[in-house]
Image (tube, rainbow, N blue to C red):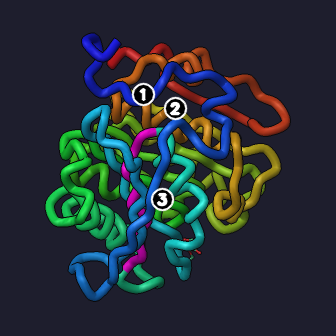
Amino acid sequence: QAAENPYERGPAPTTSSIEATRGYFATAETTVSRYSVTGFGGGSIYYPTSTAQGTFGAVAVSPGYTAGKDSLAWLGPRVASQGFVVFIIDTNSVYDQPASRGDQLLAALDYLTQRSSVRTRIDPTRLGVMGHSMGGGGSLDASVKRPSLQAAVPITPWNTDKTWGGSRVPTFIVGAENDSIAPVSSHAEPFYQSLTAAPEKAYLEANGASHFYPNSPDTTLAKYVISWLKRFIDNDTRYEQFLCPPPARGTAIEEWRSTCPHLS
Ligand code: 9J3
Ligand code: ZN
């Protein structure tokens, strides 16, 4: 397996392994003071403690308007324990707009791969961005600014810019059916439709969910975030089974759109 794909990390996945609250790898957390960095507001790095399998891909994560890193903390160990370095940031100001959050996600990735205490654990060619609300809007912005990103996951994204045809990054957009702050009809859905140059894309609409549902642990959100990052940051086709054919509608999923099968 490793000979076929040098980026695979951890054992072959199962539905229970991607739904679990923790994955295969033990993790640790290190905090980065906002006063020790420039371009973003510091944050918490969650990383697998093992170096036995080589380096890991990494993802920077931005919270939404008025929120801090703690609002998404549950995702840190949940994703890192599957085999990623996860940097959940604070923004310079909690009032920063999406374009600024995009710049800050990229500054955080540069810090992570070039200066952080975990830099030797990371493969700097396999990076992604993720974020909630204005942080999700910032993830789209970062994707256009840095086409080398391997994955983007805007979660209940908010942005006044509705056109993302400039992004060439594989993008998984998550919307919430009952979101009244970033309604899917004017945010997540048009963003998804506008991603005409993204090599692959998917859209999950969480059934009956509100704007702030990603601020608490959610198994459906986690399992597909993990699958997307594995599939596109690690090129790990063992996770393709969870994405294509698309998951069926049900109690958790109101709608799913995607480009399947994944060709890249
Ligand atoms: O959680 C968010 O980032 C909400 C976006 C928002 O409230 O925009 C209105 C200014
Ligand atoms: Zn819909």
Look at 26% across and 35% down and name the residue there: 54
Q: Name the residue under label 1.
A: 231
Over which residues does the magenta segment extend? 83-91
Q: How crowded is mark 1: few (under 14 residues within 10 Å), some or many (20 or more)?
A: many
In the rendered image, the residue lying farthest to the right is 251
- The quarter of the image holding the N terminus is top left
Real-space Cα distance between discs 1 and 3? 18 Å
Of labels 1 and 3, the one closer to you: 1
What whole-number distance in Å separates the C-alpha atoms at marks 1 and 2? 6 Å
Indicate the quadrant where residue 43 lies: bottom left
Q: What amino acid type should be assigned to the residue bearing mark 3?
A: Gly
**At label 2, which amino acid type do we have?**
Ser
Left or right: where does residue 112 sit relative to residue 204? left
Tags 1 and 3 touching, CB below 8 Å: no
User: Residue 131, which numbered label?
Assistant: 3
Amino acid found under the numbered disc labelled 1: Arg
Camera-side mark, 2 or 3: 2
- Circles 1 and 2, Cβ within 8 Å, touching? The answer is yes
| Residue 153 shows up from this direction | yes
Query: Residue beneath label 2, please?
Result: 227
